[in-house]
Amino acid sequence: MPASQTKQAFWMVVGYVLLIGPCLRRSWKPCMSTINPFDRPPRQISEWKWAWLNTIYGNYEDGVSGAEALVWTTQGERVLYRPNTWPPLRAWLWSAWRNSTNTLSR
């Protein structure tokens, strides 16, 4: 059952600050996707090195670093999320800003 919107909003704001350090340290490791929409086979993504971070800010479809994340374009295509962005910044933009509290919403 998904967490309440209030709880998600709280952890989203906390994540803006909390995830700065892990993103700067590139504290993610490879793992396999466990959520695979569109009949996509499991693929290698990333998860936080610390299990407790994954309970709130994990993303088992597209990973936490943003490097493997696929987003929709206005033309209806799926492309990599910000492929030319510095990896720590891309991870922060993906996990703290765009995709925050993904695990709590499921």
Image (cartoon, rainbow, N blue to C red):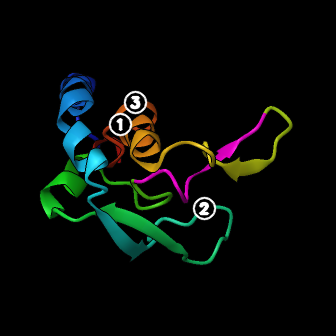
Number of the label disc, if any, that sits on residue 90: none
User: Up-down: is 27 above or below 74?
Assistant: below
Task: Determine which quarter of the picture holds residue 95.
Answer: top left
Q: CA distance from mark 3 to mark 2?
A: 22 Å
Disc 1 crowd rating (10 Å Cα; few below 14, some 14-19, many 20+) is: many
Q: Quarter of the image holding residue 101?
A: top left
When the figure is inspected, residue 43 is found, relative to residue 35, above or below; the finding is: below
For residue 97, the mark is: 3
Disc 1, SS: loop
Res 49 seen here: yes
Q: Are marks 1 and 3 in contact (CB under 8 Å)?
A: yes
Image depth: mark 2 or mark 1 in front = 1
How many residues crowd around disc 2 within 10 Å: few (fewer than 14), some, or many (20 or more)? few
**Tag 2, which secondary structure?**
loop
Q: Which residue is mark 1?
A: 100
Mark positioned earlier in the residue sequence (3 or 2):
2
Range of residues picked out in magenta: 65-73
The residue nearer to you, when weighing 106 against 63, is 63
Give how far across and how far down residue 63 sits, in percent.
44, 58
User: Which residue occupies the foreground of this view, 28 or 32?
Assistant: 28
Which residue: 23% across, 33% down?
Answer: 15
Q: In the rendered structure, does residue 58 fall within the stretch colored magenta? A: no
- Which callout, 1 or 3, points to the residue nearer the camera? 3
**Label 2, label 1: how far apart the Cα atoms are:** 19 Å
Q: Which residue lies at the image location 37% right of the left edge and 39% below the top edge?
A: 92
- Judged by its main secondary structure, the magenta piece is loop
Q: Which amino acid type is marked by label 2?
A: Pro
Return the mark for residue 37: 2
- Measured Cα–Cα span from mark 1 to mark 3: 6 Å
Q: Is residue 4 left or right of residue 87?
A: left
In the image, is 91 to the left or to the right of 67?
left
Q: Secondary structure beneath disc 3?
A: helix
